[in-house]
């Protein structure tokens, strides 16, 4: 299987990144849920349908910027988990 990450086009919108990646013979696209590519339940479904129309699957990479699951500070760790769970809920 061959895939590519939207992170290669992190400076573009998620829609543009996926549009450009569809030009390659890929089996899947990893959607990096960061920056311009943050997922919510609405844009995820839209992009999923678009990828499927080109015969591609998707993999979601959880957010990681400014997050720390190993934080000793309980509040920081809790916020990190909330952000990651929000991403999981949209899929």
Image (cartoon, rainbow, N blue to C red):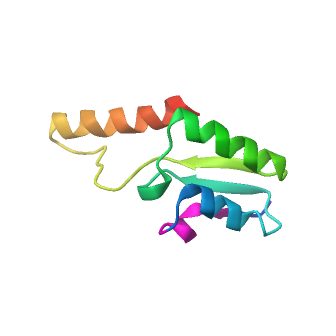
Q: Which of 48 and 80 is in front in this view?
A: 48
Q: Quadrant of the C terminus?
A: top right
Q: Is 10 included in the stretch rendered in magenta?
A: yes
Give the residue at the far top of this rendering: 89
Q: Which of 50 and 89 is in front in this view?
A: 50
Residue drawn at point x = 59 percent, y = 40 percent: 44
Residue drawn at point x = 31 percent, y = 43 percent: 69
Name the image quarter holding residue 81.
top left
Q: Compared with residue 33, is residue 19 higher up or lower down, i.e. above or below?
A: below
Locate residue 31, reporting x and y percent: 58, 53
Residue drawn at point x = 64 percent, y = 36 percent: 45
Name the image quarter holding residue 48.
top right
Q: Compared with residue 34, is residue 81 higher up or lower down, i.e. above or below?
A: above
State the extent of the magenta-drawn residues as a range.
4-11
Q: Compared with residue 32, is residue 2 higher up or lower down, i.e. above or below?
A: below
Locate residue 13, reporting x and y percent: 53, 60
Q: Number of numbered discs present?
A: 0
Relative to 40, 65 lies left or right: left
Residue drawn at point x = 66 percent, y = 59 percent: 18
Relative to 3, 88 lies left or right: left
Q: Nearer the viewer, residue 30 or 18?
A: 18
Name the image quarter holding residue 49.
top right
Locate residue 39, reporting x and y percent: 50, 43
Give the residue at the far left of this rendering: 73
Q: Compared with residue 59, is residue 73 higher up or lower down, i.e. above or below?
A: above
Q: Nearer the viewer, residue 52 or 68?
A: 52
Locate residue 59, reporting x and y percent: 64, 48
Q: Quadrant of the N terminus?
A: bottom right
Q: Is 26 included in the stretch rendered in magenta?
A: no
């Amino acid at each position: 299987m061959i895939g590519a990450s939207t992170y290669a086009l992190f400076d573009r919108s998620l829609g543009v990144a996926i549009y450009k990646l569809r030009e390659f013979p890929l089996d899947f696209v990893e959607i990096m849920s960061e920056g311009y590519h943050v997922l919510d339940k609405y844009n995820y479904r839209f992009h999923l349908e678009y990828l499927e129309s080109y015969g591609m699957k998707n993999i979601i990479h959880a957010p990681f910027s400014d997050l720390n699951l190993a934080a000793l500070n309980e509040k920081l760790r809790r916020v990190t988990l909330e952000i990651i769970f929000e991403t999981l809920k949209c899929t």
